Amino acid sequence: MLDGICSSILRSSRVRFVGVISKMGRLVAGGFRAGVTPHIEEEKIRMMYMQLVLDVSMRKDFDEYLGPTNYILCERRNVTMISIPRRDFLILIFLEPKSSFKRIVNKTFELIKEVGFE
């Protein structure tokens, strides 16, 4: 199920990476699109996963007042990052810079709903 979501999203040529990250900050499904070279080394990527999971966890403190987080968007010079919290996981997507992220977010929500991962 999780690998299927990742594979479907990776079909877009603008997507560099799709992964499902556990609440412990570990990659449990997905990875980089074939032929894509990561911008940072593996050790730093693992640290980033943990930081993103912590960020999503801290945002839950405000769910009672603002509602749950749908997704978090971070645009950087070299990559656009989308974090989508689901259950005890975080779906993480890296896009080429200045990509149209909304289409990818909508596609991801459709796939999540299709497989019952809401």
Image: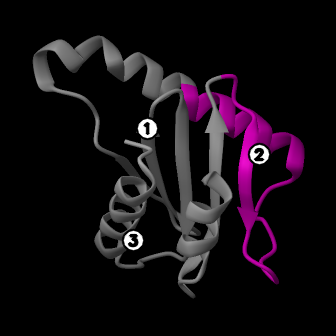
Q: Which residue is mark 1?
A: 85
Residues at marks 1 and 2, CA–CA distance in whole angstroms: 18 Å
> Of label 3 and label 2, which has the lower sequence position?
2
* Neighbourhood count class around disc 2 (C-alpha, 10 Å): few under 14, some 14–19, many 20 upward: some
Residues at marks 3 and 2, CA–CA distance in whole angstroms: 22 Å
Residue 75, image quadrant: bottom left
Hey, what amino acid is under mark 2?
Answer: Ile
Dot 3: what SS?
helix
Residue 59, disc: none
* Neighbourhood count class around disc 3 (C-alpha, 10 Å): few under 14, some 14–19, many 20 upward: some
Residues at marks 3 and 1, CA–CA distance in whole angstroms: 15 Å
Highlighted range, magenta: 24-53
Measured as percent of width and height from the top left, residue 25 is found at: 69, 30
The extreme bottom residue here reads 13
Q: Which residue is mark 2?
A: 45
Residue 51, image quadrant: top right
Q: Which residue is mark 3?
A: 104
Dot 2: what SS?
helix
Q: Is residue 118 above or below residue 6?
A: above
Measured as percent of width and height from the top left, residue 94 is found at: 57, 63
Q: How is colour applied across the structure in the image?
A: one colour
